[in-house]
Image (cartoon, helix red, strand yellow):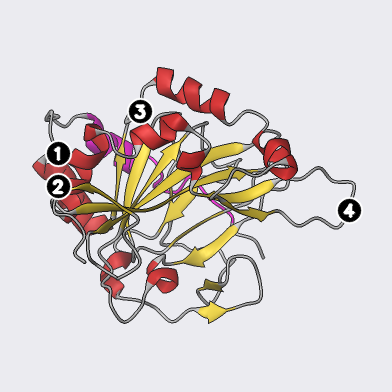
């Protein structure tokens, strides 16, 4: 059974935040409280339409380009098809800042870091950045999981935060992200390990959840979410790719190998 995203309650966050007074720096009290209660926060218009257009230009024909000559330093997971005649399609491209100068600039811009500072404190490091060009018509569903299940080790705590940026429209048809509000307060759940690309996920990984909320986004919107929140997405049943990029951030020094670059605050020790 595949995840089926529904419109149930999917609009409540946008309505709740549209009327808030915005500060030039950080978050409003209402936004802070929403994030703490629910584990995610949508920021409408986080990135300008001009920057979104630049990203589109920089990742044009990314599937064929990377199949022919991958950029040094990136890591790619490919969609797997039954037919060898199917053109190559990227499922996930790690370290996407290496293929897009605009993504590299945005991941460290003040608007991004000010929001992160309000959520995780002043010592902010880049963990990774990944492009998620879910292919139109056959893009894989992402099973229910918590990111900390992948990231946990003996030396870190679940203080990482993701920001998923919509490069194209994300909606119910093309497999927008879905969250279980408040599940970041449940602690790390037991995950099953499977011999598949996405590795570990929760029992009932493709089953529809009554407690889940689908988050539709316009290009330029960004959603910040906790490392422990349960989330997933359905397949892309539209004809176009659903283009998203997820920036993952960590508190500097939280885990020996999980701070690739310090972006704000104290330097790495050692």
Q: Of label 1 and label 3, which has the lower sequence position?
A: 1
Pointer 2 residue: 118
- Whether the magenta-drawn stretch holds residue 124 is answered as no
| Residue annotated with mark 4 | 83
Label 2 close to label 1 by CB (< 8 Å): yes
Percent across and percent down for residue 2 are 64, 61
Q: Nearer the viewer, residue 179 or 156?
A: 156
Which of the numbered marks, if any, corresponds to residue 26?
1
CA separation in Å, label 4 and label 2: 48 Å
At numbered mark 4, what does the secondary structure look like: helix, strand or loop? Answer: loop
Instruction: Read off the residue under disc 3.
Output: 47
Which residue shows up at 64% across the image and 37% down it?
Answer: 241
Of the numbered discs 2 and 3, the one sitting upstream in the chain is 3
Tag count in the figure?
4
Q: Is residue 11 magenta?
A: yes
Q: Is residue 119 left or right of residue 169?
A: left
**Whole-percent x, y for residue 11 in the image:** 38, 40
Numbered disc 3: secondary structure: loop
As drawn, which residue projects farthest toward the front? 270
Identify the mark at residue 264; answer none if there is no mark.
none
**Label 2 or label 1, whichever comes before in sequence order:** 1
Q: Secondary structure at mark 1?
A: loop
The tag earlier along the polypeptide, 3 or 4, is 3
**Few, some or many residues within 10 Å of mark 3 (<14, 14–19, 20+):** some
Q: Residue at x 35, y 28 (%)?
A: 47
Q: Is residue 218 visible?
A: no
- Give the spatial CA distance, label 1 vs label 4: 49 Å
Percent coordinates x, y for residue 199 in the rendering: 57, 71
- Residues in magenta, as a range: 4-18
- Residue 90 visible somewhere in the drawing: yes
């Amino acid at each position: 059974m595949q995840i089926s995203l529904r419109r149930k309650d999917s609009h409540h966050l946008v309505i709740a935040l549209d009327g808030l007074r915005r500060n030039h720096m950080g978050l409003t009290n209402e936004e802070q409280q929403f994030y703490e209660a629910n584990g995610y926060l949508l920021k409408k218009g986080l990135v300008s339409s001009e920057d979104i257009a630049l990203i589109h230009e920089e990742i044009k024909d990314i599937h064929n380009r990377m199949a022919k000559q991958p950029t040094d330093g990136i890591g790619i997971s490919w969609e797997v098809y039954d037919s060898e005649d199917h053109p190559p399609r990227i499922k996930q491209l790690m370290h996407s800042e290496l293929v897009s100068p605009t993504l590299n600039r945005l991941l460290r811009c003040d608007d991004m870091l000010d929001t992160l500072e309000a959520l995780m404190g002043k010592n902010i490091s880049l963990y990774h950045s990944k492009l998620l060009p879910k292919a139109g018509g056959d893009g894989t569903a992402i099973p229910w999981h918590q990111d900390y299940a992948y990231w946990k080790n003996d030396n870190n705590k679940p203080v990482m935060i993701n920001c998923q940026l919509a490069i194209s429209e994300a909606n119910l048809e093309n497999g927008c992200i879905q969250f279980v509000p408040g599940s970041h307060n449940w602690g790390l759940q037991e995950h099953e390990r499977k011999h598949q690309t996405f590795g570990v996920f929760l029992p009932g990984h493709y089953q529809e959840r009554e407690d889940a909320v689908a988050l539709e986004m316009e290009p330029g919107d960004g959603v910040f979410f906790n490392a422990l929140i349960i989330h997933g997405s359905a397949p892309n049943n539209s004809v176009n790719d659903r283009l998203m990029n997820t920036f993952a951030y960590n508190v500097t020094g939280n885990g020996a190998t999980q701070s690739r670059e310090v972006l704000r605050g104290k330097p790495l020790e050692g």
